[in-house]
Amino acid sequence: MKTKIALLILFISGNLFAQEQKMTDAEIATFKQDVNVVSKKIKTLSTDFVQYKHLDFLSKDIETSGKMIFKEPSLLQWQYKKPYNYSIVFKNGKILINDEGKKSAVDIGNSKIFGRINKLIVGSVSGNMFDDKEFTISYFKLKGQNLAKFVPKDATLKKYIKQIELTFDKEEATVVQVKLLESSEDYTRIVLKNKVINAKIDDSVFTN
Amino acid sequence: MQKSTIQFLLINCFLAIVLVSCGSVTKNYTPKKLDKTSYEVPYFSDSKTDYVYKTNITVYGNEISGIFIAKKINDTTHRIVFTTEFGNKLLDFEISDSSFKVNSIVSELDRKILINTLKEDFRLLLKKEYLIQEQFENDSDDIYKSKDGKRDNYLFISKKDHRLEKVVHASKTKEKFTLIFSSENNIFAEKIDIIHRNIKLKIELNYFKSE
């Protein structure tokens, strides 16, 4: 059943993608406000995700899945459960990795690029990344959804990510899909589902 | 007369040393009559298969992990991409027996020595056919020697189930690196280790099927 629903959503969103329509200035203002109101309320967030790595030359997307947990101000765990166990925690300027039981830590201290990545992941999932200094942003309407496209201004970041696309549920004003484009042919698409906002999450979750 | 005898002895000693070192890779193996002149490796040969592996690279004590993807894109060429678990592309190569192209590589990995090492490793990993010149055996394997420029490749085929278990890439005197394959079905390899002898580099590949 779940697969059917997922397929249906995929099919619908695929269909709608072709019908994206530019927002008016007034619509942009309302949309941004809606998202900001919701994302400001987020103290904790946990969500299941399915990641599809699309490479143009492959016959099938590479599918991995797991759970993402965020707690304010900047605790983040990204945990892959299938088809392998790999978990990465961003915590107090450190990245803690648990790769099938093999643990390692990287001190990122005040590394700008990792700070930015952290901010980007949290921003992508919470939706609050409307920073005109960092990105050139364009806004589109889809049926039941909104779409924001972010093109990095920073040259270093742009080398890794050409564009980020966030798809929002129109009613809830929360992110349902993150798409990271490396080039026109190659991208990573992350579908978020079973999102729980502001459940109690203990700090001890963010150990690896 | 005596002088030339000494010279002769010296040359002989020298030759003996060279020959002993020459034979170092195969010295424990028994020569055998050739039973084939070529060998085809099945592990990366299907153009319909996406070969996807979870990968750990250990280089001088540092660990890098990610996803290794290989795909045969035409008769001679494979495309190879290495990404992080998040999907960011770290390198993208096209490689055949005679050609090599870097489509992209992140600046942190853009070092000539690293690219050349990976090129050699991946070329051998994906190599489909080996021409055989000599054959040996030990208790468990038939060992085929295949010329590779100034170096040689030694293919270890298990006597029990006739599968390619190991390829040793060696100069005349010593091993450079070794590929170790584990394959259940002899169609693809579930686990592959690439181990270097002269630099501290080990690449482990574990096949996974995405959901």
Image (cartoon, rainbow, N blue to C red):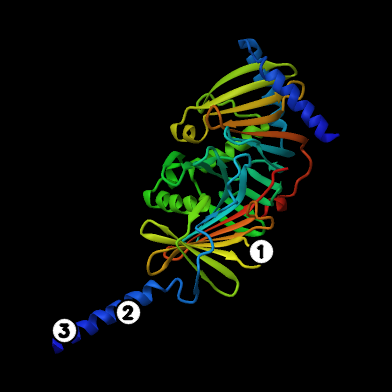
Mark 2: give few (<14), some (14-19) or many (20+) Cα within 10 Å.
Answer: few
Element type at marker 1? loop
Note whether B60 is above or below A191 in the view shown: below
- Res. A46 visible in picture: no
Image coordinates of residue B55 in percent, x first then y, are 58, 52
Q: What residue type is labelled 2?
A: Ala
| CA gap, disc 3 and disc 1 | 54 Å
Image coordinates of residue A168 in percent, x first then y, are 70, 25
Image coordinates of residue B17 in percent, x first then y, are 32, 78
Nearest to N terminus: mark 2 or mark 3: 3
Residue on which the image places disc 2: B16
What chain does badge 3 belong to?
Answer: B
Q: What residue type is labelled 3?
A: Ser
Nearest to N terminus: mark 3 or mark 1: 3
Residue on which the image places disc 1: B161
What chain does badge 2 belong to?
Answer: B
Q: Which amino acid does label 1 sit on?
A: Asp
Residue on which the image places disc 3: B4
Quadrant of the rendered image containing residue A100: bottom right
Element type at marker 3? helix
| CA gap, disc 2 and disc 3 | 18 Å
